[in-house]
Amino acid sequence: MRIERLSLDFFGHFTGKVLDFGKAGQASDFHVIYGSNEAGKTTTMEAYLRLLYGFPHREPYGFQHQRQNLRVSGLLDIGGETRLFTRLPSRSGNLWGEADAALPETAIASHLGGLSLDDYRSLLCLDDDTIEKGGEDIASARGDIGRLLFSAAAGVADLNAVLEQARAEANGLYKKRASTTRVAELKRELGEVETNIRTLDVSAHAWRKLKDALQAAKAEEAQSRQARDALRAEQAQIAALRRALPKLGEMGRLADEIADCANYPERIDINPEDLVAMRTDRGQADAELRRLLDELDEAEKARAALVMDADRLALGEQLNDLDELRSRTQTAVLDLPRRERAHDEALSDMARIAQDLGAPEGCDVTALVTSPGEIAILEDLRDKMRDAAAAWETEQREIAGLQTRITQAQKAHQSLLEDPPQLGLVDLLKRFDADALAPAIATATQAIASADTAQEQALDALFIGACTFSALPVCPADPSTAADTAQRHADLSEKLGRFDDRLERLDEDIAAVKAKTTRLSEDARIASDEVEREARARRDSLWQAHRETLTSESADSFAPAMKTVDDINAARLAHASELGELRKLLQDLADAEARATTTREQRDGLAEQARELESQVHGLCSQIGLPALSPSAFSDWVALHAKAITAERQRNRLAEHHRETLDRAERLRQALTPLVALETPTIDAALQAARRHAETERLYQDKVRAASDKTAALEEDLERRQGEKEALEDASRKSALAWKTRVDDLFGEMLSPDRLIAAPGQLRELREHDAKRLQAARQVSTMQDDQRRFTEATGSLGSRFGIGESDPLDTFRRLRELAEQAQADKSQHEKLGTRLEDGATRRTELEAKLEDIARKVVELGAVFPETVDTSTIDALRTSVGKGLDVIVKRERIAEIERQILDDLSLRRVEEARQLLADETATTLEAKALSLETDLNLAEERMSTATGARANAERDLGNVTGGAEIAELVERRATLQMQIEEAVLDYLEWDFGLRLAEDAIRRYRDRHRSDMMAATERAFAELTNGAYQKLLTQPDGASEILLAVDASGTPKQIGDMSKGTRFQLYLALRAAAYEQMVAQGVQLPFFCDDVFETFDEDRTRAACRLMEQIGRSGQAIYLTHHRHVVEIARDVCDTQPIIHLL
Amino acid sequence: MTIDQAIEIEEVPTSAVEFLHIQVDVADTDNDDALRDILRRTLRDTARNLVSESAVIRLKLTGRTRRRWQVLRDQDVWKETAAQYARETGTLWLDKVVFDLSDTAEPGHSATDELAEIMKAISEEPGFSETCRAEIEGILQELAPQRRAELLPDEAAMDQLARRLAEAGAKRILARMKGATP
């Protein structure tokens, strides 16, 4: 698995932060995430872990966004397939895939190689903390390399602690011969329980004895209980008789009391209270009937007193019909004078307006009222007339203004024509086509100047020593000849050099040979050939002398000479080989000297040739005026000279090429010079000045043209406007005539058109006043009509009912009162009729009720015998009371009889009477007292027997049935089971631990070589070879990990510096990563600035290690050190991808 | 028998205590809180639906969960937690908690998984079985004779016990290792 993109949507201080790691494809998948402190590097690593494993319950990264809003998402490449995952903080269903669908946890978990969050953190997400923790465990692993390797590979940071704790727990359960284990404690308790059981157990004989005693006690108790019960029965019988005696007396008394009422009924279903209510009802009904009859009488009388008149009753309707007229009349009384006033006011307003409009006094003002249409036409005509007049006046004013402007424009034109600037330059510049000529001149000048410079430079290059040239000198030699000569001279010089070398070597050889001969002859003391020749000559001369004389003197003279020669010869013979060598050397010397001589002669010949060449060159130099130059220098000079010639020719060609342009330029300059007021100007200056003047000239001509155009346009406008003015004048006249004709048509002589111009609006006002006048007149007429009709109607009604008021309104009021009275009488009559009808109905009801009561009394009395009086309610009530009393007494007699029979357990009362026939209260009391005494004695006997039985039971219970022994036995069983459980628990731990220890050993054996080799390799690489080897040293049953330093000294982990320790831990992780990859698990490997304690060289090595991890998986390094980023870039073969936070 | 001659049967509880085996499926518990919730809920429901006044219960945690190792590691904590919840109901008494969990994930390729495989292999070896038997025989002397007879009625029972204990022990240790890092 690898991470392709990590999005911190809402996490820590990030919102929507995306880190794109891209597709895998490079040789190494190594990324460096760089960011300053607090930029969020650790946050990024934590976010990645959240994506894989979810959010913890307490989330430290929920400080900016609330925990429920946190979200992390990412693209994970799982087996070549890229999938999107999103992690939310909810409790369940918090892993989402694409299209926001919830995924099972296994969608990610099954690809993590079984690593839990903590495993991942301690193995593949290293920071200072996790790397150190793992490291401390390695240091404290007390040397078990198996555990160490396993710890590293499994990411189990504290394996020792785990195993030790498990062992401690097992030992806490059981340990042989230990006294504080759980099993030991339980056994101790078991022992105590068993002792107790033994103490409490008893023999079978004692138990049987106790059992017999209990049996006897039980029998005694039963007997005494029987005796006591018999006495108690007797006592009860006596008590019952004592209770029955007075009851029999009461029974007889009651029977006597009801003896004469034998024929009274057995049951009476009459409630005396009902009879009381019935009597009350009858009384109330009687009283109400009487009152009702009185009321009916009175109502009848009142109704007879009321008189009903149909005419008066109809009056109301008529008055209602008149009512609207009345109300209008009443309003008109107040309104009529106001309306009349309004009419008059409208008329006076109209007269005033007519006067304002100039109508003659006393004319009919209504004749001046015109329709709104006419007024609108009049206003339109007046407006047109006014507009026409205004337009004509405006036109006149504008024509006057136009004439003034024409005059001004003509003056301006004239003044421009009178004061022209210098003219003609524009034409001149055009004639020479100055715009095209100027750049051509510049090009030509520039080209020639460049050629001049080149020529000057070529001439300068010819300067040698103090020799300078103002013009190009004539050179008699051509460059190729000069070069040839120089080449030949160089060849000669080279050969001369070679000969010199050879001569030198030969001279050295000769000197060496000479030295050798000298040394040889000195060493051997060999007389040289000259010495030998001299000695021989001397001997020969002495011999000659001796021969001649043959004297002893001569002989004596000859003898030393002879001996010398002999000595020399003897010596030479003795040193024959040296002599031979000497001879050879002398021959070599002669040879060498001969070769030296030949060589020297050849060299001298060559030197002569060289000198000849030099003298030729010197001759040429002096011819040109140069100092004496070497042939090669001369050849160079001639080459430069050829270049100078070329430069000169080039310049001349350019001058020829641009001659025409420059001639034209010169002609233009001469033509411009008198016009530009400059003293011998250059062509550029002249052109510049000329352009300025030409610009002025062009402006002037534009102005003159504009002034002339303006005058022409104004004159044209004037002509047009004068035509328009005449048309406007005509229109104004026509509209004035139309206005006048219309006014005359409408008002004739009454109004003058001129007065009306000022105020046609007053016609509208006049019309409004007329409308008001007409409305007021209409209202007045209507009101007067209403008043007349009302007076007539009330008058006729008043005379019919005898009312003669003067004011028709008063008459109407009186009539209304009359009608209302008639109406009131009618309703009273109707009300009384209703009351009489209701009273009759009620009377019938009451009479029926009284009859019903009487019938009930008769019915109720029927249950009693004839002799009993039941004629009235009161008599019936008395009879009922007595009957009920008889029934109660009969029941009491039956109740007493039942009690006596129950109490004495008898069937008939006669038996009870017989039983008590001879008894009295006194005899019965005496019997009861005697029994009391007997019973007390029996009770005492029985409680003694019960005590004895209880004691016997207790004694027996103490032996067998007691809970204590049972509890102890139960406790024993419990303890035995607890011991069993503890033992099994211990065995479980023990077996597990044995298995683990064995398995770890096998794991070590299986992986030791690979892991050790990988760790060793990584560690050597990280320390740049300072630690080449890792060793394990047996230490009792375990082993210690040692690192061998450069000097061959093994070092324990505790003795290393912090940085080196970290490097070892990192090496272990790298080796573990390699193992995981070999097992097919590839997961991203994060390091959070763990290189901080590394020096620069080791940081380089660590970067290379990360790159290497990236080759088999994905490595991500988070740092805030710029130099680490640069080192990573520098040392990695495949550039790491740098991400900035 | 009612007046209209129909027969009605109803259960009338007469016992004071009942014994219950309760299985709790913890497959959906992603964290400790969820597991605690499900334990509390199960025990409360059991207490509410009790026929008798009180009950002695044996709790069995089952299901496939990815937190198997963590639960096994902290089994003493879970036993105590369950006992406490039972006490809180006032009517339940916890006898025992049995853990019968399986892992969701396929066997991984981590070192712990490899170790588990090695442990399994060792436990099946005759040598180890022999060691276990010797250990059991030695320690059996600590038990009362009747317990011994009940625990190991015959030869086969011994092997079975040894195998069971070794398997459970291995799981226990692995659980500790899996969750060793705090």
Image (cartoon, grey):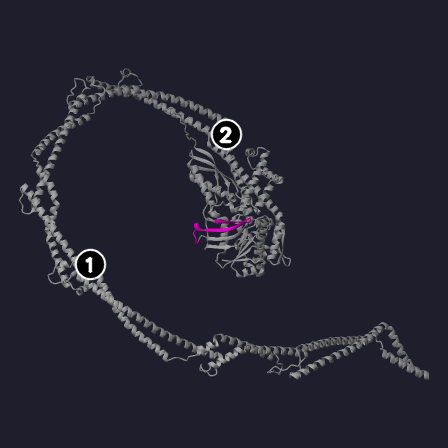
Distance between the alpha carbons at the discs numbered 2 and 1: 153 Å
Depth check: give the residue in front, A471 or A1039: A471
Q: Is mark 2 on a helix, strand or loop?
A: loop
Residue A108, position in %: x, y?
52, 47
On whether disc 2 and disc 1 are found on a single subunit, the reply is yes
Return the x and y of residue A96 as percentages of the image width and height: 48, 47
In the rendered structure, the answer to whether residue A352 lies left or right of residue B44 reads: left
- What residue would you read off at disc 2? A202
Q: What stretch is highlighted in magenta?
A: A63-86
Residue type marked 2: Val
Give how far across and how far down residue A83 sits, in percent: 51, 49
Question: Pointer 1: what residue?
Answer: A374
Image vertical order of residue A169 relative to residue A770, above or below: above
Residue plotted at (42% across, 26% down): A949
Circle 1 residues within 10 Å: few <14, some 14–19, many ≥20: few
Q: Mark 2 lies on which chain?
A: A
Query: Which mark, by number, is residue A816?
Result: none
Q: Can residue A171 be seen in this view?
A: no
Residue A198 in percent (x, y) is at: 51, 33
Q: Nearer the viewer, residue A314 or A917?
A: A314
Q: Is residue A69 on the magenta stretch?
A: yes
Against A604, residue B20 (above or below) is above
Q: In which quarter of the image is residue A997?
A: top right
Amino acid type shown at disc 1: Glu
Q: Which chain carries label 1?
A: A
> Quick check: can you spot residue A119?
yes
